[in-house]
């Protein structure tokens, strides 16, 4: 888990600086049919919010934890990330993720083994969910940087 946390912190710190250097019009340009780079960052905010809830909630709700998916497209549209001030969006992304880092650093080893039931009834554990979150973050950061 320590490797995932170190990678996570590096992604946050390096990209806070990098994202702040990207021109607003580059962030807002619709280069694909799905999302602009700004909307991808908004999706990362939504992901961070949902995972922050998951990473904390799993500690006090009935086990096994029932993973609840969310509608990514609807949330990006409803939160109006395309119209949001880019500096505010970057700060929101950074601050929510810094809280996730704090949670990841404080999680007990035994909690990493808590079982999570996905919507398709397959089973993972908190360790997998946390490390997968970091991989998901990196994937979308690479999309923004491309």
Image (cartoon, rainbow, N blue to C red):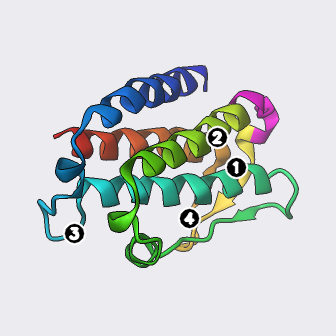
Q: Would you say the residues marked 2 and 1 are in contact, meaning their CB atoms lie under 8 Å apart?
A: yes
* Label 4 vs label 1, nearer the camera: 1
Of labels 4 and 1, earlier in sequence is 1
Give the residue at mark 2: 100
Q: Nearer the viewer, mark 2 or mark 1?
A: 2
Q: Residues within 10 Å of mark 4 (few under 14, many from 20)?
A: few
In which quadrant of the rendered view does residue 20 lie? top left
Q: Nearer the viewer, residue 72 or 107?
A: 72
List x then y, in percent, for residue 8: 50, 30
Q: Position of residue 58 (x, y in %)?
A: 77, 54
Mark 4 to mark 1 CA distance (whole Å): 18 Å
Circle 4 — which element? Answer: loop
* 79 sits left or right of 23 in the view: right
Name the residue that disc number 3 marks: 34
| Helix, strand or loop for disc 3 | loop
Give, as a single range, the part of the protein colored magenta.
105-111
Sequence order check, earlier mark of 4 and 2: 2
116 relative to 146, above or below:
below
| Tally of numbered tags | 4
SS under mark 2: helix
**Where is residue 99 shown, x and y percent of the image?**
67, 39
Q: What secondary structure predominates along the stretch shown in magenta?
A: helix
User: Which callout, 4 or 2, points to the residue nearer the camera?
Assistant: 2
> Residue at label 4?
122
Q: Is residue 112 left or right of residue 77?
A: right
Residue under numbered circle 1: 55
Question: Which x, y percent locates residue 88?
Answer: 47, 49
């Amino acid at each position: 888990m320590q490797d995932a946390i170190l990678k996570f912190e590096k992604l946050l710190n390096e990209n806070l600086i990098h994202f702040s250097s990207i021109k607003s019009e580059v962030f807002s340009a619709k280069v694909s049919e799905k999302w602009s780079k700004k909307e991808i960052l908004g999706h990362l905010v939504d992901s961070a919010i949902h995972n922050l809830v998951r990473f904390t909630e799993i500690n006090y709700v009935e086990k096994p934890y029932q993973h609840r998916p969310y509608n990514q497209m609807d949330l990006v549209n409803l939160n109006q990330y395309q119209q949001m001030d880019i500096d505010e969006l970057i700060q929101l992304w950074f601050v929510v993720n810094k809280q996730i880092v704090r949670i990841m650093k404080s999680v007990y080893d035994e909690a990493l083994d808590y079982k999570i039931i996905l919507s398709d009834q397959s089973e993972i554990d908190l360790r997998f969910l946390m490390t997968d979150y970091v991989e998901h973050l990196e994937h979308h950061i690479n999309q923004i940087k491309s």
